[in-house]
Image: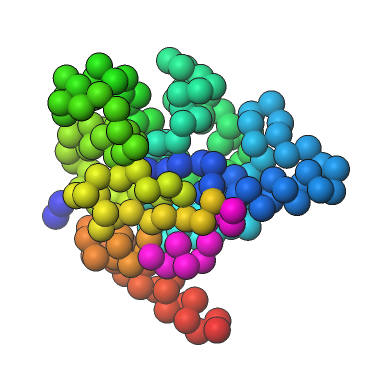
């Protein structure tokens, strides 16, 4: 019997958990849309994300620019701290590496690209080969061609929605172990019965 290895969610934050419509709503109603940890996350997006985490037992790898712009070398413990303080679902196991233009040139022969996150995800997967089942959730088209089948592009104004979760569940249901597939199929079945 093989050991169960959780699937991975490569997670962007802005446009996924932090929806721009929710930020606008808070601003228009004179609420703070920003706290000491950054932009406030949309509660509806969190509910959708929690469904995804509970059904798939996926682990989180942060691929968002939040790992770069705010925290530098302390990014992983600080991202985990945000998750704990905000009582967010899931376990952050890592962050993707931050590739400089020199890194991109040395590894891939290019200096800059719109798909920089795709290259960072590629590097993470090369160094963590035990994880074969994954999805990438982002509001921008930042993936490499070989990652397209695993990509869920959200609408940044709305953030993570039910249709995005459905797509993620289908992707993760097509690969991985039977227990996870059964969990996903049960969750999808329950959703269909609620309609």
Give coordinates of residue 122: x percent, y percent.
23, 37
- Give the colour scheme shown: rainbow
Of 166 and 175, nearer the camera is 166
Q: Residue furthest right?
A: 30
- Looking at the image, can residue 77 be seen? no
Residue in the picture at 69% in, 45% down = 23
Q: Quadrant of the C terminus?
A: bottom right
Q: Closer to the camera, 116 or 96?
A: 116
Q: Is residue 161 found left or right of 4 in the rendered image?
A: right
Which quadrant: the N terminus? bottom left
Q: Position of residue 191 (x, y in %)?
A: 49, 76
Residue drawn where x is 26% and y is 54% of the image: 148
The residue shown at (46%, 17%) is: 72
Side of 183 relative to 16 (left or right): left
The x and y percentages for residue 42 are 64, 50
Give the quadrant of residue 142: top left
Dividing the picture into quarters, in which one does residue 150 lie? Answer: bottom left
Is residue 117 in sight in this rendering? yes
Q: Does 146 appear in magenta?
A: no
Q: Is residue 165 magenta?
A: yes
Q: Is residue 155 left or right of residue 73?
A: right
Q: Which residues are magenta?
A: 157-167
Rendered location of residue 134, percent (x, y): 29, 50
Foreground of the two, 142 or 183: 142
Q: Quadrant of residue 149?
A: bottom left
């Amino acid at each position: 019997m093989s050991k169960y290895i959780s699937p991975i969610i490569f997670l962007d934050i802005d446009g996924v958990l932090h929806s721009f419509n929710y930020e606008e709503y808070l601003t228009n109603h004179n609420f703070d849309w920003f706290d000491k940890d950054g932009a406030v996350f949309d509660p509806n997006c969190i509910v959708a994300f929690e469904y995804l985490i509970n059904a798939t037992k996926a682990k989180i790898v942060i691929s968002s620019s939040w790992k770069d712009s705010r925290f530098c070398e302390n990014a992983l413990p600080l991202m985990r701290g945000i998750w704990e303080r905000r009582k967010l679902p899931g376990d952050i196991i890592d962050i993707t590496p931050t590739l400089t233009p020199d890194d991109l040139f040395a590894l891939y022969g290019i200096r800059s690209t719109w798909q920089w996150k795709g290259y960072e995800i590629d590097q993470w997967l090369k160094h963590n080969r035990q994880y074969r089942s994954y999805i990438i959730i982002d509001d921008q088209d930042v993936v490499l061609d070989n990652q397209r089948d695993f990509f869920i592009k959200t609408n940044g104004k709305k953030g993570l929605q039910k249709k995005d979760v459905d797509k993620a569940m289908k992707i993760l249901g097509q690969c991985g172990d039977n227990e996870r597939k059964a969990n996903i199929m049960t969750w999808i079945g329950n959703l269909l019965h609620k309609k």
